[in-house]
Image: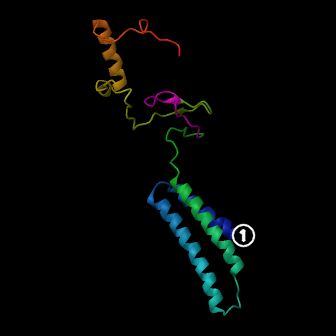
Amino acid sequence: MPIFFVGYALIVWALAARYRRRPAGYLAVAIGFSGLMSLNLLHIKLNDWTEGEIFLPVLQSIMYPYTAFVTGIGVYIACLPHRSNRGCAWCGYDLHGLGSLREPCRCPECGKVAPAEHSYRRSGVDRADLRSGDRPSSSNHAVQHAENEDQRGQTGHEAPSQATHEPV
């Protein structure tokens, strides 16, 4: 009987992991939850149908936390992000950050050459069309404005060395 509980949880969690971040993953958890709630309802009705001959409150007190546990872990697994596509196809080593995304790189774990990603979209640093649209921030603008005034001699402010500060 304990194998049923372990197996049921593993099936729900495996389906949630296989289809994570997709409606099918959440549906697997919902079906698992409804199956456990149906079993809980069966225990309640079984007590009523047999007029108390089969008394299952102990099993019900175990099933409610088990239902919450399986459902909670299933939702957590279904919410997890997918694995990175930047892993070595041979050994699974994470190649994120190694080499360029446009060129193949060699896996440091097994030595196989991993192909480059095909769906590479350049970031703002790599894209010349985005760099031309960069504007200085307001703090940079204020500093540049102050420097321009200092160069022209139109500051209207005393220089820090001329300011008189008396100790308090």
> Which color mode does the image show?
rainbow
> Does residue 6 belong to the magenta stretch?
no
Against 51, is 56 above or below?
above
Name the one closer to the observer, 9 or 114. Answer: 9
Q: Is residue 83 above or below residue 153?
A: below
Residue reaching furthest to the front:
168
Residue shown at the point (27%, 9%) measured from the top left: 154
In x, y percent, where is residue 81? 51, 48
In the figure, is residue 61 to the left or right of 84?
right
**In the visual, does 118 lie left or right of 107?**
left
Q: Position of residue 155 (x, y in %)?
A: 30, 11
Segment tinted magenta in the rendering: 92-105
Residue 94, percent from left and from top: 56, 37
Q: Which residue lies furthest to the bottom in this view?
A: 51
Q: Is residue 47 above or below residue 69?
A: below
The quarter holding residue 108 reads top right
The residue carrying mark 1 is: 2
- Residue 97 sits inside the magenta stretch: yes
Dominant secondary structure of the magenta stretch? loop
User: As shown in the figure, which amino acid type bears the numbered disc 1?
Assistant: Pro
Rendered location of residue 112, percent (x, y) = 57, 32
Can the viewer see residue 137 in this picture?
A: no
Whether residue 139 appears in this view of the structure is yes
The residue drawn where x is 59% and y is 73% is 36
Q: In this view, does 2 lie to the left or right of 159?
A: right
Q: What element carries label 1?
A: helix
Residue 17 vs residue 45, the one in the foreground: 45
Instruction: Give me the residue at 66% from left, 93% from top.
Output: 51
The picture quadrant where one finds residue 73 is: bottom right
